[in-house]
Amino acid sequence: MILRCGRQTLDLSKPQVMGIVNVTPDSFSDGGQFADADAAISYARRLRDEGAAIVDVGGESTRPGAAAVPEDVELARVLPVVEALAHDGAIVSVDTMKPGVIRAAIGAGASMVNDVRALQAHGAIEAVAASDAAVCLMHMQGEPRSMQAEPQYVDVVAEVAAFLRERARACEAGGIARERIAVDPGFGFGKTVAHNLRLLRELRAIAGLGYPVVAGLSRKSTLGALTGRAPGERLPASLAAALAAVAGGAAIVRVHDVRATVDALCVWSAVQAV
């Protein structure tokens, strides 16, 4: 399986790592650490050196309870970082739900869009379809501000799979080629601990849709609930979750701790190859 990201093709015959760069003051784990463009660029380059195949740049926090950010503020945060990394030849993903930011970031060199709303905003499909960028379609119940208030499902796996199937088909109908589409079940986005664990246990149902699966569990609150650890102390839990996701069919894991995850996946891949 491959994922076509602009002029580059990502080989998914082995698991790949997406490194997180939050150019925000309020992200749940690293808010404020890389709010300055130069600091974010330097950090992103470090993640590439550590083995990140994709660098995911976000200028608006989507943590539970997060407030919306004006488009001009988000653009000012992400565009310098996207431009610098694209100039380096990196596969740069922009983590946004705004069509205006999608268009500007692709114009600045982004070759992937990571959208927690799965391109549901008016004009979002068209913005991606007009380019050759890849897209990651994520499931979220509700909105970041209120999504963790009281999430409810009859069958979380079936409902998430049905949503992602529908959004992927809508994107294909809108002119986005299948080999440019990945899907993400949205761990922690309108889900309880029990919902997240069931999705992780039955991730094969999402992989069975036929699109590369992106799994983002790094440092999330579910891991804190299970271990009692603060976000900065969740590396062992994050590695365990990443390996469980890959074992369940995830092609890409979205993480904060790139070097450690790359090493863990190296061992995992070697065991599978024996």
Image (tube, grey):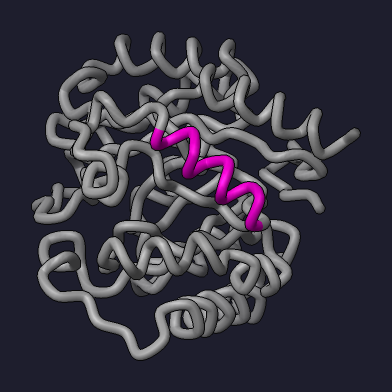
Q: Residue at x 67, y 56 (%)?
A: 249
Task: Give whichever of 22, 158 is nearer the camera.
Answer: 158
Q: Residue at x 53, y 78 (%)?
A: 161
**Horizontally, is 117 left or right of 135 in the view?**
left
Q: In the rendered image, is residue 5 in sight?
A: yes
Image position, residue 104 (x, y; %): 41, 44
Prevalent SS, magenta region: helix
Say whether residue 246 is magenta.
yes
Image position, residue 152 (x, y; %): 24, 82
Total numbered badges shown on the rendered structure: 0
Image position, residue 58 (x, y; %): 33, 38
Image position, residue 4 (x, y; %): 73, 48
Most distant residue in the bottom direction: 154
Q: Residue at x 63, y 57 (%)?
A: 248
Task: Give whichever of 187, 271 is nearer the camera.
Answer: 271
Q: In this rendering, is residue 75 above or below 156? A: above
Q: Residue at x 37, y 62 (%)?
A: 196
Can you tell which quarter of the image residue 26 is in?
top left
Q: In this rendering, is residue 193 above or below 92? A: below
- State which quarter of the image contains the C terminus: top right
**Horizontally, is 176 left or right of 184 in the view?**
right
Most distant residue in the right direction: 274
Q: In the rendered image, is residue 107 in sight?
A: no
Task: Give whichever of 60, 201 is nearer the camera.
Answer: 201
Where does the magenta region start and end? Answer: 237-248
Task: Give whichever of 96, 66 is nearer the camera.
Answer: 66
**Horizontally, is 86 left or right of 31 in the view?**
right
Say whether residue 46 is magenta.
no
